[in-house]
């Protein structure tokens, strides 16, 4: 069984949770609720909640118990994609093989849908976490992790720097800052959330934190490479958009060859980071090794 087959049931489990939790499209205000469902329930990789589930499984938890809470991470991710795609941000027309939210529903509704998804994420954690028997202490810890990852010291910091660096020549240090925040923080928080929900000991939590950050780096380098080499139909979004907007990317700063070499090196560092968790971490190792080969 390859890694995609391994995580397919987890993705389906997360999708069921999202389908059940999100307001029905016919519930007022219908335009916002339809937009929320349109963007969130579109076919996605669900890597962030899947990472949370796989991490929790290292310590004896089950997808059945973790997925209702982990699904909230996908709401945060979906909110960020809606806002990133807006004309005032990255101005993208396609996402996950469909017109972006603002193209389908208008800019105002897209902004409000993103706002609502971010807010609903924390409602989902509290509601489903309480029903799942998680104590208030651990749920507060998870909310803290995700709040920091989504805030002005996390994803927003990366997005601000990304916008401000368009068309500029920047060094690798600033590029790493952008992607460590815009992409890496939520991946790291996803891993940490799963570990916290499962009661991971401190030593292994630290190792998993390192793994999460490296996973995010590999994912972003691969994303930058796919923007150059990827196929629009496979990716579900327009290839070459980073180049047209003169975005700061790894291939632009390092060259394509060095970017691929760096991704391979970081994969091995991520595997090494999981040493305290082996042999239980086989699924996480397989997943990070898959990243450089992905086509979407």
Image (cartoon, helix red, strand yellow):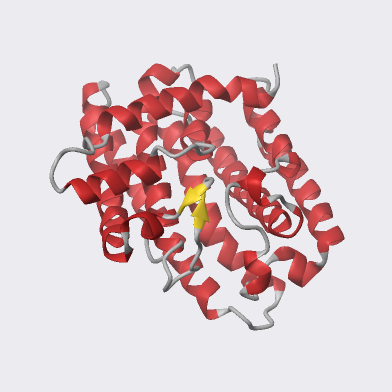
Where's the N terminus, which quadrant?
A: top right
Residue 214, given in percent of the width and then of the height, sits at: 64, 48
Where's the C terminus, which quadrant?
A: top right
Judge whether residue 166 can be spotted in this image.
Answer: yes
Is 173 placed left or right of 138 in the picture?
right
Q: Residue furthest bottom?
A: 168
Residue 169, given in percent of the width and then of the height, sits at: 69, 82
Is 43 placed left or right of 219 in the picture?
left
Q: Residue furthest right?
A: 257
Residue at left offset 64%, top offset 83%: 168
Residue at left offset 23%, top offset 50%: 32
Residue 107, given in percent of the width and then of the height, sits at: 32, 65
Residue at left offset 31%, top offset 34%: 138
Say above or below: 32 vs 254. above
Say above or below: 27 vs 9. below
Location of residue 4 (image quadrant): top right
Residue 183, given in percent of the width and then of the height, sits at: 54, 55
């Amino acid at each position: 069984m390859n890694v995609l087959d391994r995580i397919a049931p987890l993705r389906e489990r997360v999708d069921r949770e999202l389908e059940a939790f999100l307001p029905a499209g016919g519930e007022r205000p219908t335009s916002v609720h339809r937009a929320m469902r349109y963007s969130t329930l579109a076919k996605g990789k669900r890597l962030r909640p899947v990472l949370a589930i796989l991490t929790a499984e290292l310590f004896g938890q089950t997808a059945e118990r973790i997925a209702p809470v982990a699904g909230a991470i996908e709401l945060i991710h979906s909110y960020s994609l809606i806002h990133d795609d807006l004309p005032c941000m990255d101005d993208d027309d396609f996402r996950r093989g469909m017109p972006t939210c603002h193209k389908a529903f208008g800019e105002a509704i897209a902004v409000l849908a993103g706002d609502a998804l971010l807010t609903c994420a924390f409602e989902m954690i509290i509601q489903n976490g309480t029903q799942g028997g998680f104590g208030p202490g651990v749920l507060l810890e998870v909310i803290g992790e995700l709040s920091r990852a989504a805030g002005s010291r996390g994803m927003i910091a990366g997005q601000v720097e990304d916008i401000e660096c368009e068309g500029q020549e920047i060094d690798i240090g600033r590029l790493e800052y952008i992607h460590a925040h815009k992409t890496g923080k939520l991946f790291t928080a996803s891993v940490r959330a799963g570990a916290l929900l499962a009661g991971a000991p401190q030593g292994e939590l630290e190792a998993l934190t390192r793994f999460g950050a490296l996973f995010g780096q590999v994912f972003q380098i691969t994303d930058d490479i796919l923007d150059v080499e990827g196929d629009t139909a496979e990716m579900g979004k327009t290839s070459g958009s980073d180049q047209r907007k003169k975005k700061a990317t790894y291939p632009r700063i390092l060259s394509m060859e060095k970017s691929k070499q760096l991704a391979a090196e970081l994969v091995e560092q991520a595997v090494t980071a999981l040493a305290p968790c082996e042999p239980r971490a086989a699924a996480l190792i397989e997943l990070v090794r898959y990243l450089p080969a992905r086509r979407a």
